[in-house]
Image: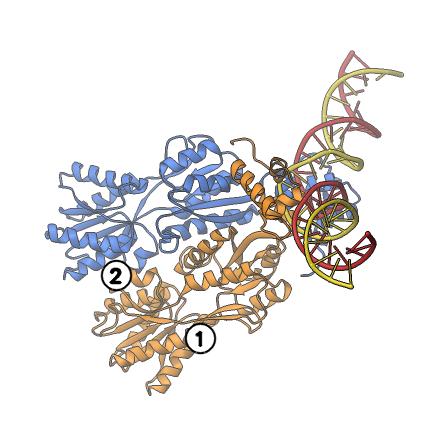
Chain colours: A blue, B orange, C red, D yellow
Amino acid sequence: MTGFRPTIDDVARAAGVSRAAASRVVNNAPGASELTRARVRAVVAELGYQPNESARALASGRRRAVDVIAVTSGNRTGRLGTHPYFSRVLAGMMPVLESADAQLRLHAVGREAAADAVEEIAADATLGMVLADATPAVAARLYRRCRRVVSMVPTAASVPGMEADNTGGAHAAVAELHRLGRRRIAAIHGPADNPCAIDRRLGYRRAVEELGLTAVGADGDFHREGGYAAALLLLEQEPAIDAMFVACDLMAAGAVQAVTATGRRVPEDVSVIGFDDSIAAVCANPPLTTMRLPVEEMAAAATRLLLEGNPGPGHRQRFPVELVTRQSTQN
Amino acid sequence: MTGFRPTIDDVARAAGVSRAAASRVVNNAPGASELTRARVRAVVAELGYQPNESARALASGRRRAVDVIAVTSGNRTGRLGTHPYFSRVLAGMMPVLESADAQLRLHAVGREAAADAVEEIAADATLGMVLADATPAVAARLYRRCRRVVSMVPTAASVPGMEADNTGGAHAAVAELHRLGRRRIAAIHGPADNPCAIDRRLGYRRAVEELGLTAVGADGDFHREGGYAAALLLLEQEPAIDAMFVACDLMAAGAVQAVTATGRRVPEDVSVIGFDDSIAAVCANPPLTTMRLPVEEMAAAATRLLLEGNPGPGHRQRFPVELVTRQSTQN
DNA sequence: CATAGGCCCGAGAGCGCTCTCACGCAAAGC
DNA sequence: GCTTTGCGTGAGAGCGCTCTCGGGCCTATG
């Protein structure tokens, strides 16, 4: 508590201008002469003035902050604590927020009450919110009420969003496996109601069809446990499987464990290809070949969009999903 | 934009009381009769009143929010995006914040300018800040200026903090390895200037000494890469190593990969025991036996402390570090 | 019956800022 | 010469809330 904190009035007084003038230069608003700007800026530097965000937010009706919404399902924090995805979103947003000096508020909202909860958040009038993993329904409803929303996952066409080529990525993964000579390519999919998982599933189906292979898959939960269980199931059903496309690295790490546990080798007997390129890919043993989802870049772009102003309805920004080769596929 | 948002004046008017009275019941402050409380509460429910946080913060000089500080080193987001630790901190805080309806603001501050940056943050007068990974020096300096700080990592005695038994955990890990019959127990340590790493290193040294073994160790960076490299180095220097104590799961995952890469088996030839019990432990193959650091619990407790008011100087809360057995150690 | 002491209550003064608005003054147009 | 345009400016009215303070009532006490 250094004690005194200068207000804009102090600045104005010291600079010999009105409060309004000082406010204009502090906010880089038009309507201030160069002379005034210089004077005020000097005083700001000297006094170490820092605007009070609360007052600013109250007066302007808008807070220089961006909300991140993580939907929690069941247990109170959902995947927030365990899934690498969220930290990547945060890490991607942080630098752009920093340089715009805006703040980041994190919210975990329950799945059922998501829309209502988020509306409460919206009432606070920040620069907008990044929906890390909202369902299309929630995202759409939310966007209708309060513009200033951008989704990180596939949504209704109207909602501004960052769009990764999930389908193409899955397709490319299967193609890569095929290129490596694999012909019995099974899939471990994500939750049936997860938009990303749906697209990846589609990509797998298409690729398998095009290549004249037969589709065989099991559903997972986007977690290691689910991947492990699904792989075990698959291996039992179809012992001749020689490759697996897994819709998320966490599950893929589990799948690799399962393959190993049945006495098979990765990648010699079974090649495994993951999705995301998260920390899990690199921790798995052997490290996973995977389809890189550029989460950080997407999050940064989403944040920039919000910072710039109201994203237009249907705004879309597309991101490629690229193959990262490591040891879980044989070359 | 549903349009109208009721203010406390609307509530007061509708309830037939003064604004002050309404404020008192909304804030559960003393000095309001049961009758008034009932009336106001009814109106609040009916109108769906929600206090404007900015106005509240401006008027009271305190914002219902808790800051989380992650120190970024070098690259702009430091370990935020890649290390499971941070999401665990956030996940631990979220529920307690939610139920106290306070908000969570995340800040990534550069290592060099950490203290200054954080002071700016402190100027905003929130309920306090949780230092996820500040160095003792920064933490101490910060605490001196603005109370309302709690550290998640070991610090100077004055700074309120959550204290996990890092030393004991490391000691227990080595003891476990010894119990399993291992006698050439190497260590992969964390960064030499990291408080947690220092304690874990100490625990290892003591245990090795007590057990009459010889200490052999290499330094890592708390990341997978460092763990991999260190393990390789160790294995080359001392090929007869039969166990490794690794100061963090991420590094341990790398170590397991390295052990495997040299043609050795985990746990048959080399047992590996990690630290943290993070997602990395479970993604490694084989899954890691590890010392569980109760990060979520610690973060929750830190948050509660801040919510309750000024933590006294030197406030300490101790947490055990417990063995979690998985497959990377032989039983 | 008078006084003291609680307990509720409402008026009102800010908190630090933004933003509208009207005004002064210069240059430009008739 | 006088009106128009325009820019730079400052006064002042809030934004929605908290919190102090004095006052009214109602009960306990002497």
Which quadrant of the figure has residue B290? bottom left
Say what amino acid the circle numbered 2 marks: Asn
Is label 2 or label 1 in front? 1
In x, y percent, where is residue A90? 45, 50
Horizontal relation, residue B105 to residue A151: left or right: right
Instruction: Tell me the residue at 35%/63% (across/down).
Output: B225
**The label number, if any, that marks residue A111 in the structure image:** none
Which quadrant of the figure has residue B253? bottom left
Task: Please say if B73 is above or below A104.
Answer: below
Front in this rendered view, residue B138 or D3 = B138
In x, y percent, where is residue A301? 45, 42
Element carrying mark 1: helix
Front in this rendered view, residue A273 or B67 = B67
Disc 2: which chain? A
Distance Cα–Cα, label 2 vs label 1:
29 Å
Instruction: Tell me the residue at 35%/62% (across/down).
Output: B278
Q: Are marks 2 and 1 in contact (CB under 8 Å)?
A: no
Element carrying mark 2: loop
Task: Please say if A72 is above or below B133.
Answer: above
Residue A326 appears in view: no
**The label number, if any, that marks residue B199 in the structure image:** 1
Horizontal relation, residue A152 to residue B127: left or right: left
The number of discs equals: 2
Q: Mark 2 points at which residue?
A: A285
Task: Please say if B11 is above or below B174.
Answer: above
Horizontal relation, residue A277 to residue A273: left or right: right
Please rate how many residues cluster around mark 2, counting C-alpha atoms within 10 Å: few if below 14, some from 14 to 19, many from 20.
many
Please identify the quadrant where the N terminus of chain A is shown: bottom right
